[in-house]
Amino acid sequence: MAGEYFFEKTEIDLGESPEFSLLPDIHQFRPGDADMSGLFNFIVNGALGARATDVHLEPGPRGLKIRFRIDGLLLEAGVLAGETSLPLVSAVKIISGMDIAQSRLPQDGRATISYRERRIDLRVSTQPTIEGERVVIRLLDRHGPLLELDRLGFSAGNMKKIRRMMSGNGLLLITGPTGSGKTTTMYAMLKSLRNGHSNIMTVEDPVEYVLEGVNQTQVNTRAGLDFTVGLRAVLRQDPDIIMVGEIRDRETADLAVRAAGTGHLVLSTLHTGDAAGALTRLLEMGIEPYRVSSSLIGAVAQRLCRVRCGRCAVASGDCQNPEPAGGCPDCGGTGYRGLVGIQEVLLVDDPVRELLAKGVSSREISKAAMDRGMATLFGDGMEKVERGLTTAREVRRVTGRE
């Protein structure tokens, strides 16, 4: 856990500056410039214009390197003179409510900005390194438009399974590494489940989107409100549908399984490599096999592939390896613009329940599911390659088959 400082802070108006693909004019800022808040505004404005989700400020031998995470990958946006690092980091600390005098410990902070009549939350963290303090700024548009469930890239067969899972009660797990779109998928599910007659409650860290008609609780560890405490309280609020941001420990897993076994639909996430791994992870946490088999309704493993730029990417002669060609201003020269999900959807039916009750390995569960038609992450990805949405290189990258 990062340091002690975590405050709501000021609102800054970034104005109506033009969007930047990255930061072509970064060199106009000189080390002696006093307006570090202006530089901060310039960087954040450029990041938002470039569709970035995160900004990295990294001190090093070359100076202060600025990188944006766009479509899942970090891209260099510019380099500032090393002398700019300390005053810029100090400005970021002031803006986000951190202790400006503390540079030996990690800190967390936050700010709210205005960008084109939208409110953007900034989650800021610092980390001391041998070259100086490193800063990461997460950009959260909590009131932005949410994708519909049917626009997340699910195949027709997988969508049918998802709808079936969501129509009942039990525990539905979304799994994948950080940045694989798990939270977006859960929000899309909650959005489709709103009907005006259900009590939908969440425990999240952080609340990334505000959903009308959903009762959302923000984890606050400083006040003693963690996932376990929040989930225990939610169960006393007569919920119908519960979303827990992440199952991190045995106690939270036990409460989620208990809630799922008593007539609630529970959505949550885990960090595992595939769908079957999410099922057996609960066993590894110490949950009894009979409880896991009776409460689980399914698991969705997910990754995000970059989408071929609709303006400049041209398929090669090999339909299995259509690659971007050239690049253009729309995609920042990468040949890709946007993301599409590739998924592995495991429906927990009677044969899978029997295997879970026996405590078998995830490999055996995965094989049994594939024998009955489950598409793997790689298989679903290659189907999207055939449709021209992404490339074989992207699918291999995100599935670890490079």
Image (cartoon, rainbow, N blue to C red):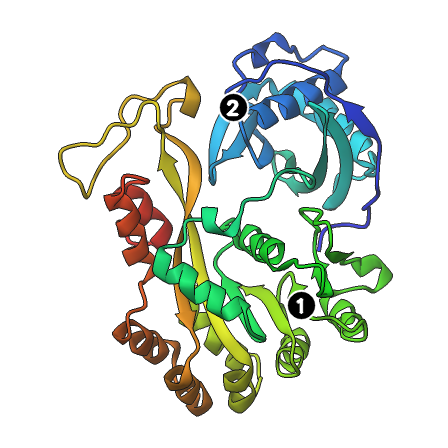
State the quadrant of the N terminus: bottom right
Residue 99 seen in the current view: yes
Residue type for callout 2: Ala
In depth, the one of 145 and 370 nearer the eye is 145
Residue 223: image location, x then y, percent: 86, 60
Vertical side of 181 occupied by 115: above or below = above
Residue type for callout 1: Ile
Report helix, strand or loop for mark 2.
strand
Position of 390 with respect to 188 (left or right) is left
Position of 253 with respect to 69 (left or right) is right
Position of 282 with respect to 304 (left or right) is right
Vertical side of 389 occupied by 249: above or below = below
Give the residue number, with chain letter if any, for mark 1.
241
Q: Residue furthest top?
A: 28
In the figure, residue 339 lies in which quadrant?
A: top left
- At 54% from the left and 44% from the top, the residue drawn is 147
Residue 317: image location, x then y, percent: 13, 33
**Total marks drawn?**
2
Position of 176 with respect to 89 (left or right) is left
Q: Are marks 2 and 1 in contact (CB under 8 Å)?
A: no
In depth, the one of 386 and 218 nearer the eye is 386
Residue 71: image location, x then y, percent: 47, 37
- At 61% from the left and 39% from the top, the residue drawn is 145
Give the residue number, with chain letter if any, for mark 2.
77
- At 27% from the left and 39% from the top, the residue drawn is 388
In depth, the one of 10 and 338 nearer the eye is 338
Residue 272 seen in the current view: no
In the figure, residue 343 lies in which quadrant?
A: bottom left
Binning the other alpha carbons within 10 Å of mark 1 as few (below 14), some (14 to 19) or many (20 upward) gives many
